Image: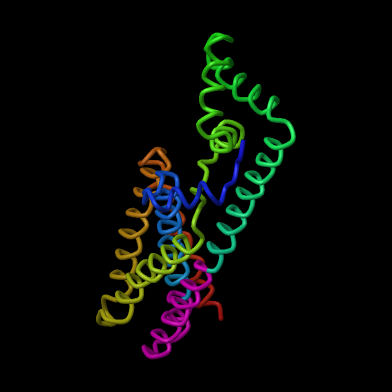
């Protein structure tokens, strides 16, 4: 029985299958984290510089430079991280493919045990295992043993672009507030922009991670306040 992943991937491409939910969530996760990081790093630099000088040009350039640096840093970090995950998944698939070729019976037994552990009778589990293995042995084994959907690997480019765009947009809120509002209102405007932004990212992160919305928002707001407080006094000190 041939268990060739390349053939399987080509078949999937012809069928034009959509991204799995895990792939979509990974891209969204990268975007939420990138946005949150963009907000906090940019406001940190803005508060430090604005506390040390009233020169609006210096404040704007410092904020813009940090926004660009943060966005590209987050994107490169996501690319490296997700690439490593993708390589790990492919290595696991290659291992299972080799095991299928060297010991097919044990792989089928592993599938059978998977269903037995979920309450299916041994006879029915064996029948299910045989049927699934005949249809697509490699896809069945990697799904059961590694929790991987064959051909659906995390895309590092999607995560990188999502993080790049989200970090840029997130950092734009405090930057616009600090640089475009009049001097008399730029500080409160920036604080409000940051608190609203981190509230939104806290809400989104909780929804994506199926966590507690209230807890996530409070945590983000506290971190945002601490970030602004520390950087403001750092600027004051120097």
* Of 226 and 138, the residue lying toward us: 138
Q: Quadrant of the N terminus?
A: top right
Is any part of residue 232 visible from this angle?
no
Decide if residue 202 is on the left or right side of residue 93: left
Instruction: Note whether 65 is above or below 113 in the view shown.
Output: below
Asked whether residue 164 is drawn in magenta, I would say no
Residue 28 rendering spot, x and y as whole percentages:
40, 54
Residue 119 rendering spot, x and y as whole percentages:
53, 12
Q: Residue furthest front?
A: 1
Instruction: Note whether 114 is above or below 15 in the view shown.
Output: above
Quarter of the image where one finds residue 67: bottom left
* Of 144 and 63, the residue lying toward us: 144
| Image coloring type | rainbow
Question: Which residue is found at the position 37% from the left and 48% from the top?
Answer: 15
Question: Which residue is found at the position 35% from the left and 69% from the top?
Answer: 169
Residue 120 rendering spot, x and y as whole percentages:
52, 12
Is any part of residue 56 visible from this angle?
yes
Decide if residue 210 is on the left or right side of residue 156: left
Asked whether residue 49 is drawn in magenta, I would say yes
* Of 93 and 88, the residue lying toward us: 93
Question: Which residue is found at the position 44% from the left and 64% from the top?
Answer: 163
Instruction: Note whether 147 is above or below 126 in the view shown.
Output: below
Q: Quadrant of the C terminus?
A: bottom right
Quarter of the image where one finds residue 208: top left
Quarter of the image where one finds residue 146: top right
Decide if residue 227 is on the left or right side of residue 168: right
* Of 170 and 139, the residue lying toward us: 139
Q: Residue furthest right?
A: 102
Start-end of magenta stretch:
46-75
Residue 97 rendering spot, x and y as whole percentages:
66, 41
């Amino acid at each position: 029985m041939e268990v060739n992943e390349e053939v399987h991937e080509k078949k999937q491409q012809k069928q034009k299958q959509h991204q799995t939910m895990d792939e979509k969530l990974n891209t969204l996760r990268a975007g939420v984290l990138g946005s949150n990081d963009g907000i906090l790093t940019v406001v940190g630099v803005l508060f430090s510089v604005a506390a040390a000088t009233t020169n609006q040009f210096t404040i704007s350039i410092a904020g813009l430079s940090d926004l660009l640096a943060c966005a590209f840093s987050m994107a490169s970090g996501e690319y490296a991280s997700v690439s490593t995950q993708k390589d790990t998944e492919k290595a696991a698939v290659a291992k299972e493919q080799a095991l299928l070729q060297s010991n097919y019976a044990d792989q089928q037994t592993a599938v059978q045990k998977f269903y037995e552990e979920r309450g299916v009778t041994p006879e029915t589990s064996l029948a299910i295992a045989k049927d699934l293995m005949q249809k697509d042995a490699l896809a069945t084994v990697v799904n059961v043993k590694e929790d991987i959907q064959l051909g659906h690997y995390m895309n590092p480019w999607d995560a990188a672009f999502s993080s790049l765009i989200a970090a840029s947009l997130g950092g734009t809120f405090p930057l616009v507030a600090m640089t475009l509002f009049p001097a008399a209102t730029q500080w409160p405007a920036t604080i409000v922009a940051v608190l609203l932004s981190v509230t939104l990212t806290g809400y989104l992160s909780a929804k994506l991670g199926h966590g507690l919305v209230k807890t996530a928002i409070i945590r983000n707001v506290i971190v945002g306040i601490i970030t602004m407080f520390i950087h403001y006094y750092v600027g004051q000190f120097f």
